[in-house]
Amino acid sequence: MRLMQSLRDGDVRRLAWAIGSPSLFEPGNPAWQGRLRSDEWSARELVRCTDWLHAQDRAPGALKLALGDPLVNTPLGHTFEKFVLFWQATRPDVRASTRGLMVRNGGRTLGEFDIVLLRHDGVIETLEVTVKYYLNLRPELGIDGCIGPRAFDRMSDKFGKMTTRQTDLGHTEFGRAAIARWLETTCGETRSPDQLMVENYALARGYVFHPSADATIAPELSTAHGRGLWQTDATPLPDDGATKWRNLSSREWLGTYRGVADESNWPVDPAMPRMCARLEAYADDADYGSAWQETERRFVVRADAGLLKAL
C-alpha cells in the first residue's frame, strides 16, 4: 500500500497493480497444474520492481508510449497485456519478448500466445494473460453464476479455456512451430520445434462484483480476489455526504483510482455497465492539489439489461 501511495503517475500505479494485485483465481486449484502465477510470486515481483517503478514514476514516457493514446478505444484486455509485457520484458533473466504471437495451420488460426519470453538460459516462457470483471449474478451456481459485462463472457468458459487449451498451446505442434519461427525471424536463433524447452504459465487479475458482502464465493476464486458489489441503476448509489462517486473509463478500470474527482474524457461504451468508484478526499497534495482516493468499487447495470436474464 505504501508503494501505491508513493507513485504519482496514474499509469505507473496501474503498472504496479498489474504486478502485485491478487490473483483472480485460486492458483492451488489442481486444474491449473501449478501454472497460474501465485500471489507469493507476484509479491516477490513487486519487491523486485520497486526501484524500477519509482524510476518509471519519475519518467513515465516509455510506459505511455508502450500503452498508446488513451483516447483511442482499445480493448482493455489488450491494454492490460501491454502493461504485463512492459513489466515482464524487463526481467533480468529475459532477453527477448513479444506479444500476440499467432498460431496458425495454413490459413486457419488455432490460437494466440498473449506473451512469449525468451530467457537467457534458452527456455521459452509463454504467459496467458487475462483481466476480467464479473458479476456474481447467481452465487448458488458457483463460477457458472458469474458473468462478464457482456452476456457471452462466462467465468466458467474462461476458467475452462485457460486451464486447458490456452495454457497447453506451447506444447502443441503448431504452437511450437510458431515459437520456432519467431525465434528465427526476430531473435536470429534456429531451433526445430522439437528442440524447444517451453514452460507455460498464466496470469489472472480482475474483480468479481457480488450481490452482497456475504455472498457465496466459488472455490475456483482466490479468497483474496479483487471484489466489489453490483447493483442496478434502479437504486441510487449510497451517499454519505462526505464521499463522491466517479465513473471509471478505459484503463482506469485497472487498479485503485487516485486523482481528481472530475471524470476523464476517455472512451466509454454506453452499452456496458458503469464502473463506479467511491472516492474519499485526503489531505491536499502539493502536486495534485485537491485529490481523491478510491475506497469502494461498484458495477452498475441497467435494470432492463438483458445481462440480468442471461443465467
Image: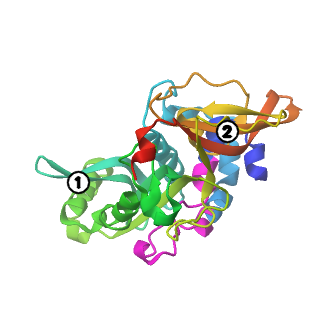
- Position of 109 with respect to 93 (left or right) is left
Name the secondary structure under disc 2: strand
Front-most of 19 and 188? 19
Q: Which of the pair 109/131 is nearer the observer?
A: 131
Identify the residue at horizontal 64%, vertical 41% (top origin): 12
Q: Amino acid at mark 2?
A: Ala
Residue 213 lies, in percent from the top left, at: 67, 57
Q: Residue furthest top?
A: 265
Where residue 227 sits in the image (x, y, percent)? Answer: 62, 54
Residue in the image at 37% along x and 62% along y: 162
Circle on res. 181: 1
Residue 205 seen in the current view: yes
Q: Residues within 10 Å of mark 1 (few under 14, many from 20)?
A: some
Magenta part of the protein: which range? 16-42
Q: With respect to residue 189, does 308 lie above or below?
A: above
Residue corresponding to mark 2 = 277
Q: Residue, x 43% and y 33% (percent of image)?
A: 74
* SS of the residue under disc 1: helix
